[in-house]
Amino acid sequence: MRDTVGRTPLSHAAQFGRSGIVKLLLDIGTVEVDSKDQNGITPLGWAMVEGRQSTAEIYDFDINSQDESGRTALWWAADKIQSGVLEVLLAKSDIDPNVEDNYGDTALSRVVNQLNRWQSDGILTDNILRSGRKSVVALLPHPAIDINCLDKDRLEVLLQIAGARGSNEVGI
């Protein structure tokens, strides 16, 4: 059963953080865990768009599945600066943290881009900065992370993020 944009009940339950329903649907065993909607987004992808950490912990899924824009669940967690979700996803043995979307962004470059953009727009708060630092700290120690995905400007922003303490000045 799918809605008009190709989303399943599992996709909606995952997006809205209904862990009990997600678990029930998975226990039934007749759902497509990695079903994609019209935009290629899986239930896990929708859960990550909304920062639903519990969904990432519940079931086994294709962790590196990409949507129509090449974005993975890890990319979406990075986009939303969800450090707890990033940690859960990075603990999966088959995660590839260096998957690039169609525009060349990885999870690490996405976190850096978001923080830099929010700082430039004047909307970077201390809370967002702290979460951003936790996200970077979650990503960097992963043995497969490729810091070479960052150009010189992004690398400078990353170093400023890592060194920032209670200040919202992280831009170049």
Image (spheres, helix red, strand yellow):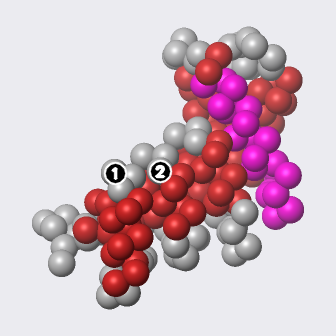
Give the quarter of the image for residue 146: bottom right
Image coordinates for residue 66, horizontal then vertical, percent? 49, 68
**Residue placed under numbered mark 2 in the picture:** 52
Q: Is 78 on the left-hand or right-hand side of 47?
A: right
Residue at 25% x, 68% y: name it.
9
Q: Is residue 127 above or below residue 99?
A: above
**Residue placed under numbered mark 1 in the picture:** 16
Image coordinates for residue 120, horizontal then vertical, percent? 58, 17
In the image shown, does 165 or 117 lie closer to the viewer?
A: 165
In the image shown, does 9 or 20 lie closer to the viewer?
A: 20
Asked if residue 70 lies in the magenta stretch, the reply is no
Residue farthest along the bottom direction in this orientation: 30
Residue farthest along the left direction in this orientation: 4
Kindly state the secondary structure of the residue where label 1 is placed: loop
Main secondary structure type of the part rendered in magenta:
helix
Asked if residue 143 lies in the magenta stretch, the reply is yes
Residue at 18% x, 78% y: name it.
1
Q: Is 32 on the left-hand or right-hand side of 55?
A: left
Disc 2 and disc 1 in contact, CB within 8 angstroms: yes
Q: Which residues are magenta?
A: 128-148
Image coordinates for residue 24, horizontal then vertical, percent? 35, 73
Report if residue 99 is visible in the image.
Answer: yes
Q: CA distance from mark 2 to mark 1?
A: 8 Å
Q: Residues within 10 Å of mark 1 (few under 14, many from 20)?
A: some
Quarter placement of the C terminus = top right
